[in-house]
Image (spheres, rainbow, N blue to C red):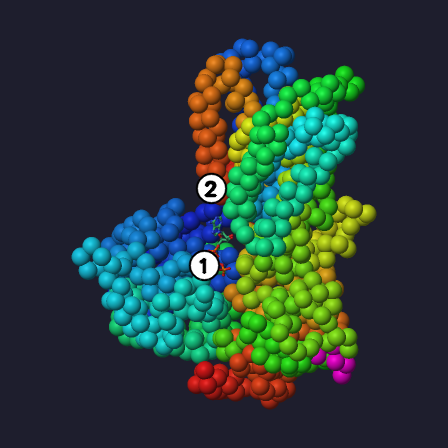
Amino acid sequence: MTTPLWELVNICKAFPGVRANDGISIRLNAGEIHALLGENGCGKSTLIKILSGVHQPDNGEIRLNGVPLTLGSPIDARTKGVATVFQEFSLAPTLSVAENIFLGRYPRRGPFVDWARMQAEAERILASLEIRIDPRRLVGSLSVAEQQLVEIAKAISVEATLLILDEPTTALGAHEILVLHNLLRRMKSRGVAVLYISHRLDEVVELVDTATILKDGRVASTAEATRLDIPSIVTAMIGTSVDEHYPKEQNATNEVLIEVEGLWSAAGARGASFSVQRGEVFGLGGVIGSGRTEIARAVFGADKITGGRVRVAGRKLRLRSPRDAIAAGIALVPENRKFDGLFFNFNGGPNITSAAIGSIRRLFLLNKSEEARITTNYIRDLEISPAAATKFVNLLSGGNQQKIVIARWLFAQSQVLILDEPTQGIDIGAKIAVYRLINQLTARGCAVILISSDHAELIAMSDRIGIVRGGAVVETRPASQITHAHLVQASASAATAA
Amino acid sequence: MTQPSAFKRLAGQEFFGPFLALLIISLFVALTTPSFLDPQNFRNIALQVSILSIVAIGSTIVIITGGIDLSPGSMIAFLTMCLAVFIKNQGMDLGPAIALTLLIGCALGIGNGILVAYVGIPAFIVTLAGLSAFKGLALTLNGGTPAFSLSEQLGQVFYGTFLGLPLPFFYVIGSYLLFMVIMEHTRLGREIYAVGGNENAARLSGINVARVRLIAFSFAGACAAFGAVLLAARLNSGSPNYGANIELQAIAAAVVGGASLAGGRGRVVSSLIGSLIIVVVQNGLNLNAVTTSMQSLTIGLIILIAVGLDVWRARLGRGLARLTGQRTA
Ligand SMILES: Nc1ncnc2c1ncn2[C@@H]1O[C@H](COP(=O)(O)OP(=O)(O)OP(=O)(O)O)[C@@H](O)[C@H]1O
Ligand SMILES: [Mg+2]
């Protein structure tokens, strides 16, 4: 065998109570896109953090062109040719896009920062990614998707022999993913080794040349052994085969539960109208920035409503805050679990009861044994990790965290559930669990509004789909009459319209 | 999973670290300073701790919401002057005078709360302004001079006994029990922790975030007012200089006791342990005739160490997790 460009040999790394990496070996060749796959918590991010100098391995060796080396710090790794897009953002929100891209290595003229050159360079890099963002804007004012793109721009702005991307596409839409894939293919033809992590297997099999699959910190399937088709990847990932990725049940009734009419919000809903029946899943498709999240937040009373009406079960609502929406039986599982969903200072129980805490009172006091009982029940019913009962939720995997946020609204007995990118960043097993939960909800007569940038998921799990453009629903059709091409086309026309 | 041993359960409690620190510091002071163990000295410590620990409850609750309160020191100065004026100049009876003082304290706290929660000015700025403004208010009363010998019975409020125990003992136990129940066993307490933990998630869970913040500041006002009444009773006087720097000691007590300045973490009971640590250190320095300037310096260092610990707590927590074998999922 030829010497690979980069090689990891028998890498071990333990955290308190977990062996995150337990003897992992991987060979990364120049001009090859290599996928690193596996369930939540199997050790992918830990491995790339070792390769990026963030963590030091307890054991094992990193080799560049066959020569062992140590990567003592992120800066050390960068100078030795490793560029990384981390799963958690590492951007400074109060600095401009250009400053973030060149953070720590501003171009200089004499002792001064050469702002003009920095600006021009940043524009060039953003253009290569087809990103239309003014480099002078503050990163804090960008959407999650835009921040992700800046993060990628930052990584590719340095000359690297190894480019690592840890779930770069979770927040991106179809169009942005396409652009990113093209860029990665160009990098590959220039001889860069690319290591790519994603839970969206359809895009993985499109893009990569080879894949290593991890399970519980060990290699479950080596690059040589992995066959690049979704069923065999899934089998290697979770140990068993899955015959139904989208276990969709038809539960729609004829009874309209929620009607949204000409809804405007200060944040970006612009005359959105749609209605959803009991037992129905209504999907919202559209590009990043089309206003799906803004419509969801307006219906939930989270953004100020400036016009239009929302009716639930025929009753007109006054939505001044999420409290009003919750009282009317509306729930929102937000796009960003970390910032808008979870209380990291609580374990699972208080996270589940937070939206209906009033219902576990005995006179003035909280009935904590009742809360514990409820928590145990949800842990059992939704197959949440038992650790959720006692551990702070930041220690749980993404899938378990998402189930906890959904359990919150089950406990609040919500009738209308808005799920904004509910399977973002969670593994295939947890995704299927979320689909089953959607079925349970609709079987019970709830209405579900599903926002997803994963077209296959959106089409498979929805009964009807509304295409969103400019903060309004411009077209509604049965999901059976919508194809991936449709959604892409809708995206494309929206992109040119924008 | 096996049942953790009693020791591990205790070690897992948030207040275990501060409690251990208190034991070690007390032991050190006791070994180096024999007069520390004198019963009279214990009495002094207890009396001093009573006022600080009650003020610290309010500071802790505000810190748990993710805010900070710099105003209780000046508030106490103003309120002791109010009480003095009510009794001495207005000739009010003790009961109504005390009740009115407590009410004014709550009102000032609510004022802080309105500015923070509804007007949207950062807590640091609002209470920094309060620190200056309340002191100013105190100086407008009684010509800006202290008022002594307020009333014969006022001293009894502090020095009186019940069932053979000094009254401050009951004040402390009562306040702590009340606020521990509120913080750990009521909906309001849960909402206070939720707001401190993640304000966005709290709002999206239907919690009235502004109302929660307002209530936290009103609690802080009430605790400061209680402290002011006890201080005035202890010294049978009111003065614009009373309460100086107590806000820093209270914040230090909260943080030393384990509250995180980032919000969402910390327990009311820990601020009692934190107050004891501060007072024992101060007492040890006093007994060794350390100058006030050095004492100031020491308290400054304690605050620095405590806040440093807050910053390092994440790493310490990981170390502790290793010890107790916590597992992630
Ligand atoms: N800094 C840390 N301290 C303690 N435990 C950690 C730390 N980082 C990761 N872990 C644990 O190590 C294991 C592997 O985590 P890692 O983040 O590598 O998973 P992952 O494969 O990237 O998962 P995901 O797909 O959800 O991103 C998990 O059990 C996680 O809880
Ligand atoms: Mg990861």
First to last magenta residue range: A254-259
* Three-letter amino acid code at the position of disc 1: Glu
Q: Disc 2 marks which amino acid? A: Val
Quarter of the image where one finds residue A248? bottom right
Q: Is residue B157 above or below residue A332?
A: above
Asked if ligand 1 lies within 8 A of label 2, the reply is no
Question: Could you say which is closer to the camera, residue A246 or residue B292?
Answer: B292
What residue does disc 1 label?
A: A88
Residue drawn at point x = 77 percent, y = 28 percent: B93
Provide residue B139's location: percent of width, then percent of height: 57, 33
A112 and B107: which is toward the camera: B107
Q: Element type at marker 2? A: helix
Left or right for B153, reference A494: right
> Is B294 contained in the magenta span?
no
Magenta region, main secondary structure? strand
Residue B159 seen: yes
Output the chain of dot 2. B
User: Which residue is rendered at x = 81% and y = 47% of the image?
Assistant: A363
Q: Position of residue A333 (x, y in %)?
A: 62, 65
Is B301 above or below relative to B69? above
Q: Residue at x 66, y 59 (%)?
A: B205
**Observer-nearest of B251 and A344:** B251
Residue displayed at 63% across by 72% down: A305
Q: Position of residue B109 (x, y in %)?
A: 64, 43
User: Do the residues under discs 1 and 2 have CB atoms within 8 angstroms?
Assistant: no
Residue for badge 2: B311
Confirm whether residue B318 shows in the render.
no
Residue A256 is one of the magenta-drawn residues: yes
